[in-house]
Image (spheres, coloured by chain):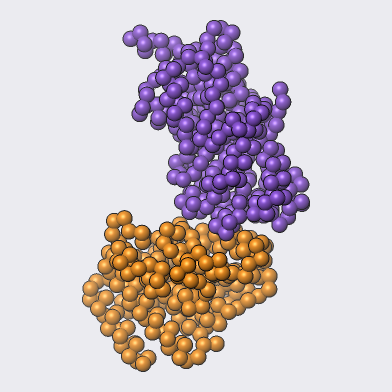
Amino acid sequence: MLNEQQIKKLKIQASGICEKTVELIYHGGGGHIGGDLSEVDVMVTLFNYIKYDPKNPQWSGRDYFILSKGHSSETYYTLLSEYGYIDRKELDTYGTFGSLLGGHPNKKIAGVEANTGSLGHGLGMATGIALALKKNRKENRVYVLTGDGELGEGSNWEALMSASKYKLDNMTWIVDRNFLQISGKTETVMPLENLKEKAEAFGFKTVEINGHNFDQIFTALNIREKDRPVCIIADTVKGKGLACAENKAEWHHKTPTKEQLEQLKKDMAEYRKELA
Amino acid sequence: MEKEACSSAFSKMILEEAKINKDIMVVCTDSRGSAKMGTYPDELPEQFVEMGIAEQNAITVSAGMSYIGKKVFVIGPASFYSMRSAEQVKVDVAYSHNNVTVIGISGGISYGALGATHHSLQDIALMRAIPNLTVEIPSDATQMRAIIAELLKAGRPTYIRIGRNAVPVLYHDMSEIKIGKSNRWFSGHDAAIIACGQLVCKALEAAELLKKEGIDITVVDMHTIKPLDTSMIGSVAKECQCILTLEEHSIYGGLGGAVSEFITQNIPVPMKICGIPDEDVPNGTDEEVFKYYRMDPEGIAKKVKDLITIKTTCKNE
């Protein structure tokens, strides 16, 4: 469990990441802002929780993180910059010709473990990594973050079966369950419910949490179950923090206006003031 | 003539290698029988991964294991690995620089009467258009072993297509075989056949038939479709002034496509692309289908003679 001080620290950090992500998208001329903002709190907690070394991205003792919902790269880039994998100058190239930081992450970027973008690949990649680590008798853990709309891809369910078959208890799958995809509600486009029962039926130890509650995220990341992979369904709000974008499918990929960015900055400053 | 299946050559070799190198992993998709994996799964269960009938996931999981340093060979039907898993090969293997060897078995029309669902007649067109992917079609078991040996030394994202049946052994010395270097047979200047896979043998037989008629040709065994041995193609184009390509693949986009892309842009000479036409293939064994499309030695010899006529006409005009 996290204490009040730790939660406050995470809240402040997350509000900064939210702000910087929206700024990055504003200056870069576009990005998958909705899914970027729904994943901020989970991603910030992960970066505070998993083992890694930005000075040595290939450190053999690190945990592995795969952003299967590769389109939500702007939050990822912001965090990689915050932790020193990417320098500030590099981050500023986002959206320009020839930038290392494309719309989807690539292993050429320090800290990135998999080239994602096409949906339905991260779970299989995480399964392969976790399986090889297990065969090598390594203790490293593998975390993979998928979207919810992404789960329409059949390859995910193939991966779940194999992760379960090989008893990959060194793997945690997190779903950014914001209930929206580009065309509208996930439950209208292609219903996923009951997702928890589905994940359980596929052999995963599954919990549903509030994806904006740092204590719940932290507690869920600590779940270990012998011989079973873990699934965390993190209920989130698409566009979280940017008031005009919250829970709106049309903000799946959009550039905020200058006024909207300024409003967000004001809101975040106010929020941090309240916390202090 | 001594015969051996490329799949048997692979399974025997990988079993011995994997006993020594514990990083070697073989991945199957309910395909251990058709891949002729024999005792491997029982002898080395820790180095064998069964993914069930899920080719897409098999490729991605292979890529993940490769990222951790495993030497992964994923083996199953060419038709499914190249098309159903095309995106996984593109994204997780080639684009992600994961050194997985994808082995497509029962390639081309090996599955015979099982039909178009099981034929892989578009795999080369698809695979060779993917950047950073090496594409191989060995013509015999020795080539298969030499390619695997080279990949074990230095892995690279690779697609290897092999046939189902035992094929004549054409080579006995593995040192003659290198990825990216074709093998030339004969030195005739009347025409050149550039072939790959099990049709190389038929091209050699056609060359013998033509020799009896006083026609001397060259046969090139182009086992590596990518990176293409353009230096050899340039040489035989210059020497023979006409080229017939021969492959167990659609006439679109395969070896013929690759050779013609080089020829038309560098050293234009008359060419004929011999492969499977763009139509439903009749049910039958591969041998019956080859005969139907005149891809037997007699038919190939006839096509070479027709090509030589075109070459002569062009010269005289």
Left or right: A34, with A229 as reference point: left
Q: Give the number of marks.
A: 0
Which chain does the purple colour mark?
A: B
Residue B307 position, x and y percent, is 46, 15
Q: Which of A247 and A223 lies nearest the eye of the viewer?
A: A223
Residue B198 visible in the snapshot: yes
Taking the spot 45% from the left edge, 70% from the top edge, the residue there is: A54
Q: Colour of chain A?
A: orange
Quadrant of the image occupied by residue A82: bottom left
Taking the spot 45% from the left edge, 13% from the top edge, the residue there is: B308
Taking the spot 36% from the left edge, 76% from the top edge, the residue there is: A18
Left or right: A185, with A121 as reference point: left
Residue B233 position, x and y percent, is 45, 26
Left or right: B40, with A251 as reference point: right
Q: Is residue B78 above or below residue A200?
A: above
Residue B165 position, x and y percent, is 68, 32
Residue B254 visible in the snapshot: no
Q: Which of A230 and B170 lies nearest the eye of the viewer?
A: B170
Q: Is residue A265 above or below residue B40?
A: below
Q: Is residue A107 above or below residue B226?
A: below
Looking at the image, which residue sits at the far left? A259
Q: Is residue B255 above or below residue B102?
A: above
Taking the spot 70% from the left edge, 38% from the top edge, the residue there is: B8
